[in-house]
Amino acid sequence: CQVLMDEVNACVRGLLKGGADEIVVWDGHGGSNSMDITKLQYPAQLGTIGGDLAPCVYTDASFDAAIEIGFHAMEGVSDGYMNHSYDSHHVCNMWINGEPIGEIGINAYEAAYFGVPMILVTGDQAACREAKAFLPDVMTVCTKHSMSRYTTINRNPIDVQKDIEAAAEKALKNLKKFKVKKIPSKLEYKIEFMCPNNVIAYEKRGWERIDHQTVVTRGTDCVDVYSQYVGWAAGVHNKRFGITP
């Protein structure tokens, strides 16, 4: 947790040097209890996520840029440390329109919905590789060199913090070079679960069951489609939070 705090604070310092005047940090790891607000670099604000009514997207069109700190490569990558597709306890694989996707891509789509570009991603080399494949213009900082799901060589935190601070400053100063990810006009969101019990639950919510482990839903609104994964009925999440692109 302390290493995460230090990396986030390095990013905040870099963004301030790059000209940022408002920074919101969302604690998205685990139960949103990984960060100590008393150690947060001023003047950043800390967002925490919890409860059954939590929204599935944490940005809007008022923001100029989005950054992913400490993200993981998708499930099944041979050299990705702690690789998982958003949920390491339940999900085997996820696809958007037949293309594999993980937390890096999902968050990029959510930001793009509001016209916000993803400018920086940090994580191991597998996460950085995935980010560059999905977002060719994005900057990345490799924080560790992984060999398997549980084996990695962590770079020295001082070096990592220097690199993140420098990358955040450079990215924000060159904001115009980053393109907003184009969102398909039609979306097919497919999920393969580890346990068939999850499939039954999603079938009850209206998802189409493909086989004993896989379900699919379809739509044109990427935030609404993804919100159905976290438990919202079609159309309810965006109405509840007044979400529009």
Image (cartoon, rainbow, N blue to C red):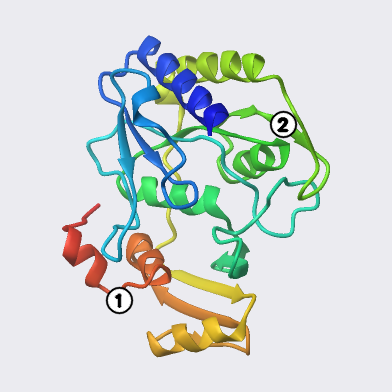
Above-or-below relation of 211 to 9: below
Residue 110: x, y in percent?
Answer: 38, 51
State the residue lying farthest toward the right. 147
Distance of label 2 from label 1 (alpha carbons): 39 Å
On the rendered structure, is 208 left or right of 42? right
Residue 45: image location, x then y, percent: 28, 30
Comes first in the chain, label 2 or label 1: 2
Task: Find numbered disc 2 in the image and state the secondary structure of the residue it sits on.
Answer: strand
Q: Residue at x 33, y 45 (%)?
A: 48
Looking at the rendered structure, the number of numbered marks drawn on it comes to 2
Give the label on residue 64, or none.
none
Disc number at residue 144? Answer: 2
Question: Which amino acid type corresponds to the residue marked 1 in the rendered image?
Answer: Ala
Give neighbour class at mark 2: few <14, some 14-19, many 20+ (Cα, 10 Å).
many
On residue 234, the disc is 1
Q: Residue at x 68, y 59 (%)?
A: 75
Res. 66 image quadrant: top left
